Amino acid sequence: MGVYDFVDTFAGLPVVRWDEANPDDPETVAWSISSDYGSQAIPAVFEELLAKTGPGGPVALIVQDWGEPHASPFPMEVLTGNAHRLGNLRALFLGEMTGEQCEISWIKQDDITPILETFPALTTLWIRGADGLELKPARHENLRELVLQSGGLPASVVRAVAASDLPALVDLELWLGVDQYGGDATVDDLAPILSGRSLPSLSRLALRNAEIADDIAAAVAAAPVVARLQVLDLSMGALGDTGGEALLTGQPLTHLLHLNLSHHFMSPELAQRIVEELPTVVVDVSDQQQEEEWGRYTEVSE
């Protein structure tokens, strides 16, 4: 199972390809670039993009296939080495590829700390793929949304997020994945986030696509951070009745606006109980799965 759709909007802007659009105002769209399966190298594509967007560069940028992403990570210097030409950049999505292009767990990534260090005005950062992904604890004054999509997110990256100083972050989304593809994080790695000690502005917490969803639900049921959330998202994972019961018997969740538990392994009866006991919350318990002989599965793995 993988990812098979591209986003239509990013950072609130409609997405256009660099080679297909000439908008009157280049700052009103999110630009998507790709090496086009190697026929044109990504540095050359980047130059074409800057010719269209002007001296400040794009406001929002999506980097798709950079040429053999299963073999080597994105050449980060294309961005960091051109920071003086990217003064407008506020949103970046690095690695938007479908399963037909490159399975999510095959996408090579690198240390993304330089992105945070080089672009202090960035407000939105999405990364897809975690093979080789690294992050060091960092401080960033303006980042509001961090999304790390993977079939297996390394515990070291989870710990670095938890140890980072991100005072403006309101939206954190981690696709934790499965151990088979490097997703070795545990609830202990999430402890600083769940305790509320880090990320003081957080209002949406999405711990998605998790093989350990029951463990996460049990921890969330008593986690101090939940009291200040508006949205809690445990979707795409292997959540079963044990995790669902923990959510029901734990701290009150009636203050939430939205609770997303879609793609789950709970019984229909328990899923309905959660909906009924949270009548003022938008609860999503859609996409019920049936456990296989070999066990449960996340929505996205390979």
Image (cartoon, rainbow, N blue to C red):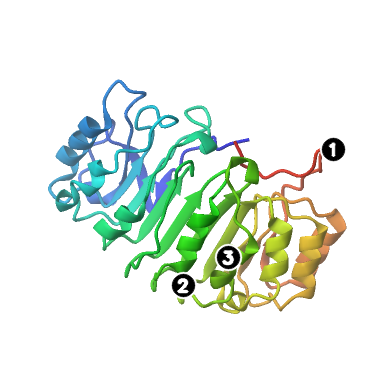
Q: Would residue 248 be visible to someone looking at this image?
A: yes
Query: Along the polypeptide, which appears first: circle 2 or circle 1?
Result: 2
State the image coordinates of residue 98 (x, y, percent, origin top left): 50, 34
**For this view, does 33 lie left or right of residue 219?**
left
As measured in the structure, the alpha-carbon distance from the residue carrying label 2 to the one carrying label 3 is 12 Å
Residue reaching furthest right? 269
Q: Residue furthest left?
A: 55
Query: Which of labels 2 and 3 is toward the front?
Result: 3
Q: CA distance from mark 2 to mark 1?
A: 40 Å
Q: Nearer the viewer, residue 132 or 43?
A: 132
Task: Evaluate if marks 2 and 3 touch, with contact meaning CB atoms under 8 Å apart.
Answer: no
The amino acid type, in three-letter code, at marker 1 is Glu
**Quadrant of the drawing holding the N terminus:** top right
Mark 1 or mark 3, which is nearer to you?
A: 3
Q: Residue at position x 14%, y 52% from top?
A: 84
Quarter occupied by the C terminus: top right
Amino acid at dot 2: Leu
| Mark 1 element type | loop
User: Mark on residue 199?
Assistant: 2
Residue occupied by mark 1? 293
- At x 72%, y 47%, the residue is 287
Please tell me whether residue 260 is drawn above or below residue 263 in the rendered image: below
Residue at position x 34%, y 50% in the image? 92
Q: Residue at x 34, y 68 (%)?
A: 139
Q: Which residue is mark 3?
A: 190
Q: Tag 3 or tag 2, which sits nearer the N-term?
A: 3
Residue type beneath disc 3: Leu
> Vertical placement of 279 versus 65: above or below?
below
Element under disc 3? helix
Q: Position of residue 192 (x, y in %)?
A: 54, 72
